[in-house]
């Protein structure tokens, strides 16, 4: 084994210590960065969950509105049928009333 002089040994020890300390500082910075990324990831996932929930709420609301609109459309169709029936009944009644008035007028004359 080769002997290393004191100055070289001191330089190598210092270099080793600085390398280890540098690596330790780098690991601390990477750990802090990882924690920031994890926190940001958690916030992003929370925001996505909230967006998904709102989207689901909107879908449910849309389905409820669509169902209500269908019921309104059916009600309008029934009302239109009823109105058409009443119009026919009214026309028929008006015709019968007119016929009755003519017969009554003939009868009254004589």
Image: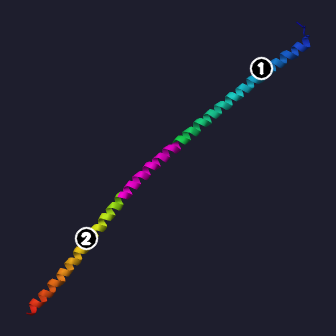
Of residues 11 and 45, the one drawn nearer to the viewer in this rendering: 45
Q: Residue at x 35, y 60 (%)?
A: 72
Q: Residue furthest bottom?
A: 109
Of residues 11 and 88, the one drawn nearer to the viewer in this rendering: 88
Comparing marks 2 and 1, which lies closer to the viewer?
A: 2
First-in-chain label (2 vs 1): 1
Q: Is residue 51 left or right of 95 when viewed as pictured?
A: right
Of residues 60 and 18, the one drawn nearer to the viewer in this rendering: 60
- The percent coordinates of residue 25 (x first, y second) are 74, 25
**Helix, strand or loop status at disc 2:** helix
**Helix, strand or loop status at disc 1:** helix
Region rendered in magenta: 50-70
**Residue 81 lies in the magenta-colored region:** no
Q: Residue at x 58, y 38 (%)?
A: 43
Q: Residue at x 21, y 77 (%)?
A: 92
Q: CA distance from mark 2 to mark 1?
A: 96 Å
Q: Residue furthest left?
A: 110
| Quarter-of-image position of residue 101 | bottom left
């Amino acid at each position: 084994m080769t002997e290393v002089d004191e100055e070289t040994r001191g330089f190598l020890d210092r270099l080793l210590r600085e390398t280890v300390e540098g690596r330790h500082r780098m690991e601390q910075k990477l750990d802090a960065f990882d924690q920031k990324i994890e926190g940001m990831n958690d916030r992003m996932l929370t925001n996505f969950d909230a967006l998904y929930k709102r989207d689901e709420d909107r879908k449910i609301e849309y389905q409820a509105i669509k169902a209500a609109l269908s019921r309104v459309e059916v009600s309008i169709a029934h009302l239109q049928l009823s109105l058409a029936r009443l119009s026919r009944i009214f026309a028929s009644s008006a015709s019968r009333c007119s016929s009755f008035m003519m017969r009554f007028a003939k009868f009254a004359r004589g």
